[in-house]
Image (cartoon, rainbow, N blue to C red):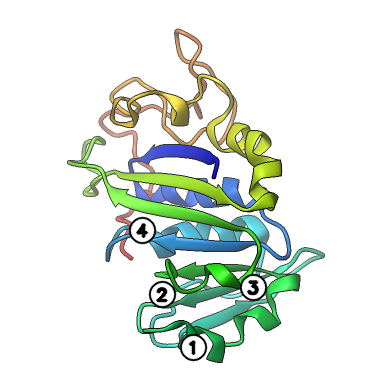
Amino acid sequence: MPVLAEILVPTAARMRDLGRRLAALLRAGDLVVLTGPLGAGKTTLVQGIAAGMGVRGPVTSPTFVIARVHPATGAGPALVHADAYRLGSRAEVDDLDLDADLDRSVTVVEWGEGLVEGLAPSHLEIKIAMAGPATVPGAGDEPRTVRLVGQGPRWEAAAESASLALTGGPGGCGQLPPASSCVSERQCQCVAVSVGEEPGGARCDGRHVGPGALSEGDATMGS
């Protein structure tokens, strides 16, 4: 059960950055089980995954539709985005026939813990938790801690490469202990989406936290 990364994510834009970074690791047949409280940013993360995969259609919370298929625009797999919030048993999950598309799609299930893990021999467990008061001035959002744990042979084999990709390598922001120390003024963002270096060797994305440093994409995370 390798822990691939535990990352502090300060804003919605950085949550989408993390999703795009994660998309590069995903392939057809992968099952992602996404959990966290209401408003934690689960759908925001899936929006980043969808952007990174290059699939069609806007990604919104599928609570009332239960599952949506976002077809690929190129040679990559489709994205199946499901929500198990209203499902009370594995029998109800079986009725969705998610396993019918599993081999040729990346399947991401919100609120799926304890219900969907049996659909595949391996899955990626992602847990999002509130991490305390906002660390980015003016963000209007409290940071989240995102913990990624691989389950099964697929992620055991890919654990080291996946961890390096998600955190930017040894000394990357996602690996700084404790996670709460990872974001403050003039320190690097926890999601290392491009190459840069802070004094002391910590890798970062070149974007620093400070007054006026937020982009238009740094909206609140929502669901």
Q: List the single residue furthest toward the right.
A: 75
Q: CA distance from mark 4 to mark 2?
A: 10 Å
- Identify which amino acid the numbered label 2 is placed on: Ser
Neighbour tally class for label 2: few under 14, some 14-19, many 20 plus, Cα within 10 Å: many
Secondary structure of residue under mark 3: loop
Ranked by sequence position, the earlier of labels 3 and 2 is: 3
Disc ID at residue 61: 2
Residues at marks 4 and 3 touching, judged by CB atoms closer than 8 Å: no
- Identify which amino acid the numbered label 1 is placed on: Ala
Q: Which of the two discs, 2 and 1, sits closer to the camera?
A: 1
x, y percent for residue 115:
46, 74
Residues at marks 4 and 2 touching, judged by CB atoms closer than 8 Å: no
Disc ID at residue 202: none
Neighbour tally class for label 3: few under 14, some 14-19, many 20 plus, Cα within 10 Å: some
x, y percent for residue 30:
66, 62
Tell me the quarter of the image containing the N terminus: top right
Q: In the figure, 72 relative to 146: above or below?
A: below
Residue bearing mark 4 = 41
Q: CA distance from mark 4 to mark 1?
A: 27 Å
Neighbour tally class for label 1: few under 14, some 14-19, many 20 plus, Cα within 10 Å: few
Residue bearing mark 1 = 91
In the image, taking residue 143 as reference, residue 55 lies left or right, namely right
Q: Nearer the viewer, residue 151 or 85?
A: 151
The answer, for residue 14, to whether it is visible in the render is: no
Residue bearing mark 3 = 56
Secondary structure of residue under mark 2: loop
Secondary structure of residue under mark 1: helix
Q: How many tags in the picture?
A: 4
Q: Which of the two discs, 4 and 1, sits closer to the camera?
A: 1
In the image, taking residue 87 as reference, residue 54 lies left or right, namely right
